[in-house]
Amino acid sequence: MTSGTGPRGRPGAGRGLPERGLLLLLVLVLLEGSVVFPLGAASSPDVDPRGHSEDRAVAEESQNYSKKAFPVLSLDYHHIHVPFEIALWVLLASLMKLGFHLIPRLSSIVPESCLLIVVGLLVGGFIKLAGEKVPPVLDSQSFFLCLLPPIILDAGYFLPIRPFMENLGTILMFAVVGTLWNAFFVGGLLYAVCQIQPGNPSDLHNLELLPCLLFASIISAVDPVAVLAVFEEIHINELLHILVFGESLLNDAVTVVLYHLFEEYSGAGTVTILDGVLGVISFLVVALGGVLVGAIYGFLAAFTSRFTSHVRVIEPLFVFVYSYMAYLSAEMFHLSGIMALIACGAVMRPYVEANISHKSHTTIKYFLKMWSSVSETLIFIFLGVATVDGPHSWNWTFVTVTVLLCLVSRVIGVIGLTFVINKFRIVKLTTKDQFIVAYGGLRGAIAFSLGFLLEEKHFPMRDMFLTAIITVIFFTVFVQGMTIKPLVELLAVKKKQEAKRTINEEIHTQFLDHLLTGIEDICGHYGHHHWKDKLNRINKKYVKKCLIADERGREPQLIAFYHKMEMKQAIELVESGGGFKPPSALPSTVSMQNIQPKKPAAAKPVQRALPQLPKGREEEIRTILRSNLQRTRQRLRSYNRHTLVADPYEEGFSDFIIKKQKIIELEKKIIHMNNLTLPAAPPDSPTLCRARLASGTETDFKPAQQQKGKQSSPDPQAYRPKRDSVPTIQVDLASPQSPDSVNLMDEFRANGSRREEEEDQGLTMRPRGEDGRREQLTRCLSDPGPSADEDEDEPFLP
Amino acid sequence: MGASQTRPEHRHQDLADRTGFSLEQIKNLHKRFQQLSGDEDTISKENLESIPTLANNPIRKQIIGAFFDKSAFAECLLAAGGAPHFPYRHQRGFILFGLRNQHRGEAGSCDQIGFEQFLMVMSHFRPPTLKMTAEEKEAMRREKLRFLFNMHDTDNDGTITLVEYRKVVEELLSKSGSIGQEAAEAIADAAMLEVASTNVPTMGPDDFYEGITFEHFEQILKGLEMESRMHIRFLDVDTTTMRCGKSTS
């Protein structure tokens, strides 16, 4: 800080030096304040729950004995006790997440999961210091039924299907064989180590083989929550991400079976070959059954969503409820709930997305992300709390051996399995890849919860197990989780490509798919591509017809992609403040004119300016526009019926109208964009005139130059009405707008000037820089949604 | 090829050297070739068109066309000549195909192809091996891209023009009915615009972008990792007996 004052003080040395110093001091204090504040914000919630709980305790006692007059104000904490504490925990988790992201430097060093565990440790410590009983936060009931499903559903719903299916063999190999290997290797060696200590009077000798194996099967499964938390921060390439993450999801079936198997036989003491065979069968039942249950619910959800076009508000709910039902149903039969959820999410997604509105889609997306991130935060905090709370019995030998064996078995397992897998893979896994896969095998809260489930009377060493599990979790999350990021950079492992998918890539991906299928057919052996193609065709022919209501939802992937891209660009255009930008991210002046085959020499500038739109194309544009406008209007109506009548002045609605008008404006621009860039147009374009007339704000309509005489040079970036290309389009643009939307607008105009401002903005897209206040308003209007994951941001369409 | 035809083993070994296929793979492909051609030495377009599973492929015409494309064949030889891992820099290869090389740049297609050319086309779909160096991979990528490029560049003038590109997209969407045909043009236009704007960012209003050259083609498909994606599994074991009897007459 002192070094900072030196150079800054010098220029001011000439004039009043003390004044300068004072100013600097002020700045420093302010800076200090802004640095301290987030720290304060981050640490204050630690104290929060404890303080409240003390209050509660006092309140409870006083309330019980004050029963004289009619209580005007009574305190009944007990009444709200449970939900209140849940809310407090959630609040704590959210505040922690908030605080964490307020400190930018911290997040680059320590992964969030580590920090959250530390917070949990602190909170647990406070609770313990206060002498309160720590609530059984991570007991299996709440963990498996409330905290885990959102995370898994989020993972399943947004599962990148293509890489997942392409690598399914490898993933299954790691998930099934790898986990089995881990469990038996760790369990067996652990048992051996426990037996080898002749002179040691520890009670490790009493440990039998089966409990060892049970413990090993708990500890050997890679945990999806931990993997997600760490891998999302290191932005590793898609292949490695899907390998590790897919493994963590699919090994659930193995864990479930092993767990129940060993738990069952721990009491009996002996395992016969028959039991082994039953175990294998049970594994198949658990895994396939889980997938089946999930798929059934997924199809049900897709089928339901076909009929929701009139009740858009509850659309997202179906997704959540059906998935949760799938999870619960699978758990009911002790099938793999995780696999059921994954299957359910993955199956329903394509159909549901084609059926529901864009708004519902956005809702689903943000709800899932919100739930899963809160769950994740809570899980890590609870892990910390449970660590402080739990009864521990620390045994150096056991814990050290466990950690070591876990590491060793993972490394051997990955290397051995890749050796086998690489014989079948086309894209081989390199040594670096193997290292990351091995190193990314993090353990997490699922293991802890499973350990927590063990019964004391069957497993006298339960406390020791729990301690060892916690140690392994902490070791993997802290040591591996913190070092994996520098290691990834050190090894120069390929990172995820941030670039967006271009339309050319999409075309060629499709082309390649068909080409490879065709070549396989010519070769006469039916490989992946052949079956994939067959499946796709069945899907298109039968399944989509049953499950998707809208004709448009059935359009081929390429067209869907094109529409999506078009919309995204349009939205970006608006968000950027209405400045006219070429469609690609690059600054470029290339327009359609440049690629259109040139007309013979007669192409005078004037003639080219009025472009070569063939009649057919003109018609096409018109139909596209008409149908799109029709659709937005219909949706608006159906939405009206359910939410707007109840509260027409609700802010969401005005937002809605603005959005709608943005879109209308946009369609126009797209046409401009797609067809021509023209020299600056005569300002009084009939299109805009009509548009403004329709909305009753024609007074505002003047070209920027005329309206603001003092403004010497108009902003070159600003969107100016281009000379309209196809005169007939205007009619289509303006007319659907006029009948009902104007009425609605009029209703709103009465609502105050501010709203009017907004509407004007949304409607007309005035050139920028005309008025400071207006410009700000435009900013306000841009989509308020989170901008963290930009590539996922879908256009926010009504 | 006439001389070696008498001794199939020797001939196969020779082909294996030049295409990089294993002997078993060549044997399998040869069996398939004979099955398709009806035990003839050459195969015709009609033979390929009659494959039942191919009937549903939207780009069937282009796939079959690729087999009978003279210039693509010549191009691929040239490209392969430059690729170090491709042993058909081999003196003999050039002598053999020297005649065809003269046809380079000439549009058009042959009616019949022999097993060698069939194999040459197939060799574009070999997967990369683990032992390949970065340069070899790069060469393989270029060679595969060149093959794709030639599929799109129907008149062989070295550029994919807007008309040609539109045709590609149209074919791609040809199985999806009327929506497909409507959208195809718009999509091709947008794609072309994208190529133009990524490769030639500044263009005056009077400039004209003639079409996608091979360099630009490479540029736009950089992200797709063609060298590893454009491949199919050529089986080492004989599966003709296992196949579900969909013989093609």
Image: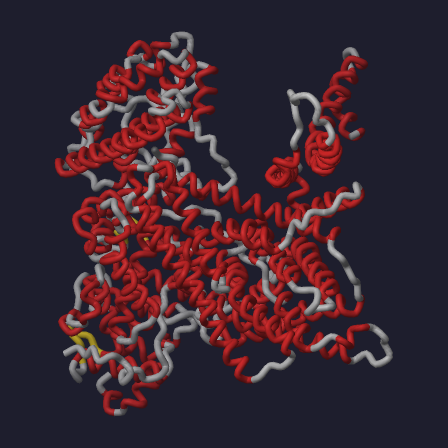
Question: Residue A590's x, y, as percent?
Answer: 33, 37
In the rendered image, the residue lying farthest to the bottom is B7
- Tell me the quarter of the image containing the N terminus of chain A: top right
- Residue shown at the point (49%, 42%) measured from the top left: A789
Q: How is the image coloured?
A: secondary structure
- Residue shown at the point (76%, 67%) measured from the top left: A400
Q: Nearer the viewer, residue A292 or A411?
A: A292
Do we see residue B214 in this rendering?
yes
Question: Residue B193's x, y, as percent?
Answer: 31, 42
- Residue shown at the point (80%, 66%) measured from the top left: A396
Q: Nearer the viewer, residue B76 or A191?
A: A191
- Tell me the quarter of the image containing the C terminus of chain A: top left
In the rendered image, the residue lying farthest to the front is A68
Within the image, what quadrant is residue A585 found in? top left
Question: Residue A227's x, y, as percent?
Answer: 58, 56
Query: In the rendered image of this protein, does residue A88 appear above or below residue A724?
Result: below
Within the image, what quadrant is residue B153 found in? bottom left
Do we see residue B138 in this rendering?
no
Query: In the rendered image of this protein, does residue A693 appear above or below residue A170?
Result: above
Total residue callouts: 0
Question: Residue B7's x, y, as percent?
Answer: 27, 91
- Residue shown at the point (59%, 68%) measured from the top left: A259
Query: In the rendered image of this protein, does residue A648 appear above or below residue A100?
Result: above
Query: In the rendered image of this protein, does residue A599 appear above or below residue A647?
Result: below
Q: Nearer the viewer, residue A553 or A598?
A: A553
Within the image, what quadrant is residue B84 found in? bottom left
In the rendered image, the residue lying farthest to the top is A709
Q: Is residue A393 left or right of residue A104?
A: right
